[in-house]
Image (cartoon, grey):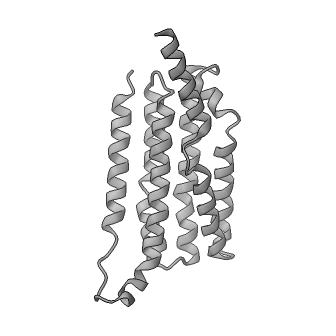
Amino acid sequence: MGKGRLEAFTDGVMAILITIMVLELRIPEGGGLGALRPLVPVFLTYVLSFVYLGIYWNNHHHMFQLVDRIDGKILWANLHLLFWLSLIPFATGWMGESHFESLPSAIYGIPLLMAGLAWTILESRIISLQGPGSALAAARGGGGKEWSSIAGYSLAIPLAFVDPRISHALYVFVALLWLVPDKRVEAHIDRDLSRRRSTG
């Protein structure tokens, strides 16, 4: 089964989610700088969520460069990931509109945590199909970044009720872990391209 339609569908969903989020940014009431002040939390939350969706889109693109074929289980694993990502606009809007209160800050972490778990499931399903000797299996290694992210989200959710700023810092920290495309995957992509050129 080819992977092109899965990638195209994923790209379309990501674009829609970003569009939904930007449409939630309201036009300020008034023409002065003071009119922007109530929108600052909403805008900051939008920026963080935009970065998260960009990270998933970027890393999904890189990962699928190492994928030769897919099956029905991979299609469902990818849909599972997209389901949790589709909840990010709701969580983004609530956290921003509430000005970072505890409960919305905790709820914001739930789709991030579940998307992180869904990502590991998708990776594992691809490796299961392609075999333990596949390029993706070698690139992923022990999955340290994946599990560090899940640990960060798992801490951020309850800590939002202690001090929401701690959970916000953890959300930013995890985003920074993934901001640069996964170098483990990029190294294997470069190696694969070099091998193809040498054999071509």
Q: What residue is drawn where x is 58% and y is 54%?
A: 113
Q: Residue furthest top?
A: 199
| Residue 92 image offset from top left, x and y in percent | 45, 66
Q: Quadrant of residue 4?
A: top left
Q: Position of residue 127 (x, y in %)?
A: 58, 26
Q: Is residue 38 visible?
A: yes
Q: Is residue 81 left or right of residue 12?
A: right
In the image, what residue occupies the spot 50% across and 9% down?
A: 199
* Count of labels in the image: 0
Counting from the top left corner in percent of width and height, residue 39 is at: 40, 79
Residue 69: x and y in percent read: 45, 22
Residue 14 versus residue 32: which sits nearer the camera? Answer: 32
Instruction: Please give the name of the residue rendered at 63% of the width and 60% of the height, measured from the top-left corner.
Output: 173
Q: Residue furthest front?
A: 198
- Decide if residue 18 is on the left or right side of residue 145: left
In the rendered image of this protein, does residue 100 appear above or below residue 47?
below
Whether residue 127 can be seen here: no
- The quadrant in which the N terminus is found is top left
11 shown above or below 28: above
Name the one closer to the observer, 104 or 63: 63
Query: Quadrant of the rendered structure where residue 134 is?
Result: top right
